[in-house]
Image: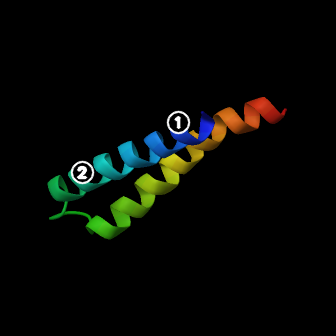
Amino acid sequence: MLGIIVLGFFMLGGTIGMLMGRLLARHIPALLLQKIFSVFVFLIALLPLTTRLS
């Protein structure tokens, strides 16, 4: 169940990253923006795990 939620977050983050990358491609390199988004999404996905462990 949690794996599906995490996978959904990653897919959502990737989609948002791609869309934002296309919008801001002139200002910020798309790859850099996508990396930032994937790190951000990864941290969001880790939040439920850390709260469950503590």
Q: Which residue is at the front of the view, 5 or 46?
A: 5
**Residue that appears at 30% across and 46% down:** 16
Q: Position of residue 4 (x, y in %)?
A: 52, 39
The colour scheme used to paint the residues is rainbow
Query: How many other residues sit within 10 Å of disc 1, few (<14), some (14-19) or many (≥20)?
Result: few
Quadrant in which residue 1 is drawn: top right
Residue 48 is tagged as: none
Q: Nearer the viewer, residue 27 or 18?
A: 18
Question: Position of 36 compared to 46: left or right?
Answer: left
What amino acid does circle 1 point to?
Answer: Ile
Tell me the quarter of the picture where residue 8 sits: top left
The residue to which callout 2 is attached is 20
Foreground: 49 or 8?
8
Q: Which residue is mark 1?
A: 5
- Residue 23, percent from left and from top: 16, 53
Image quarter in which the C terminus is found = top right
Q: Secondary structure at mark 1?
A: helix
- From the viewer's perspective, is residue 26 above or below residue 3? below
Marks 1/2: CA–CA distance = 22 Å
The residue at 37%/42% (across/down) is 12
49 over 24 or under it: above or below: above
* Residue appearing at x 26%, y 55% in the figure: 18
